[in-house]
Image (cartoon, grey):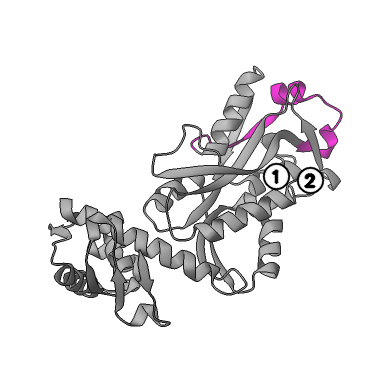
Amino acid sequence: MLFMVPRALTKVKLLIIFSRPSFSYICAMSSIRQFRTALAAARLGSFVAAGRHVGLTQAAVSLQIKNLESELHTQLFERRAQAAVPTPQGRRMLAELEELVARYEQLQAQSGDTLRGSLRIGTLVSSLMGTFGTVLARVKHDYPDLHITLLAGQSADFAARVAAGELDAAVVTEPPHGVEPALVWAPLYQEPLVLIAAARLRHKSVASLLATEPFLQFDRSLWTGHLITEALSRHGAAPNTILELNSIEAIAELVRQDYGVAVVPLLANANWRASKQLAVKPLPGPAIMRRVGMLERRRHGKQAITQTLRGVFAQAAP
C-alpha cells in the first residue's frame, strides 16, 4: 500500500493508492478525521454517540458520513431510529479504513526522533499509588511530546470503554474471566495481598484478626474484590464484614482510625509499612498477587505508544 501523505493530513483530501485485492483502485478520499468519525459511529452504534466521542453534532456526523459514502459509492450504514448499523459492504470498507487510520497514527507517533501524539488511558486510582505513578513520571520526562490523558475509574467499566474505542487503553486488574476476543490484556506488574490493621493490633496473627476484628471489604463486584474474596476463601476465613467500599485508599484510612481490618493489595508507593498507625501483615502461605496490566484492542493506531509504555514498565519492575 502506497501513501502520499500531505503535512496537514486532517484538513485536506488524501490520495491513497490501494494495492490490496479488496481495494484495488485509486480514489481521492476524505480526511482521517472523517474516517475516525465513521469508525466511532460503527463502534458506538449511533451518530449521536459518535458525535459526543469526536466532538461534533449529530448533523455534522451525518454529513461527514454521507460525504464519505458518496466518495466510496457505498452505503456504509443503515440508518435506524436510534441506531446506525454497518451494512455488509460497510463492514468491509470500515475494516479497511480502520487499518488506514491505525497506520497513520503509528506513523504520526513515530515521526521524528521521539514518541509523540496522544493517548487516552483509563486507570485505577490505586494504580497511581503503585508502579504506574512512577512510570508516568518517567514517561513525562522522557517523551515531552507525548500527551497522556488519564481517566480514573474501575476495571470492569474500562473494558467496555476500551472495546468501544472511547479509550485507547486502560491499566486494570487482571480480568477474572478473561477478555473478549477483540481485546488483549498484558501484565505490567503485581502486588501481594496483605492484611492491614491498626497499629495496636500489630502483635496479633492474621487468622486471629480475621476471626475477631470487624472487616472492611473491598467491593466484591469489582475485579480486585473478586480476588480478595477468593483469598479469604482459600484461608477458610469468614470475617464479620461491617462495610464494603470500592476505594483501597478509603479502606486504609478507616483502618488507621481503628474501624476494623482489611485485606488489600500492597500498593508500591503507599508507604504503609513506615506508618506508625498501620500494621501490614503478609497472608499465610504462598503470596496471593493482584496482577495489574494494560488492556487494549488487539489492533489500534496507538500501539507504538502503548508498546513504549509497557517497555517502561518492564524497566521499572523490581
Q: Position of residue 317 (x, y in %)?
A: 73, 47
Q: Which residues are magenta?
A: 197-221
Q: Up-down: is 2 above or below 175?
A: below
Q: Position of residue 123 (x, y in %)?
A: 56, 54
Q: Nearer the viewer, residue 36 or 246?
A: 36
Other-residue count near label 1 (Cα within 10 Å), few / some / many at <14 / 14–19 / ≥20? many
Q: Is residue 304 visible?
A: yes
Q: Are marks 2 and 1 in contact (CB under 8 Å)?
A: yes
On residue 285, which mark appears? none
Q: Nearer the viewer, residue 170 or 299?
A: 299
Residue occupied by mark 2: 272
Please tell me which residue is depicted at 39% across the width and 56% down the height of the picture: 165
Give the label, 2 or 1, closer to the camera.
Answer: 2
Residue occupied by mark 1: 252
Which of the 4 image quadrants contains residue 235? top right
Q: Earlier in the sequence, mark 2 or mark 1?
A: 1
Amino acid type for the residue under numbered disc 1: Ala
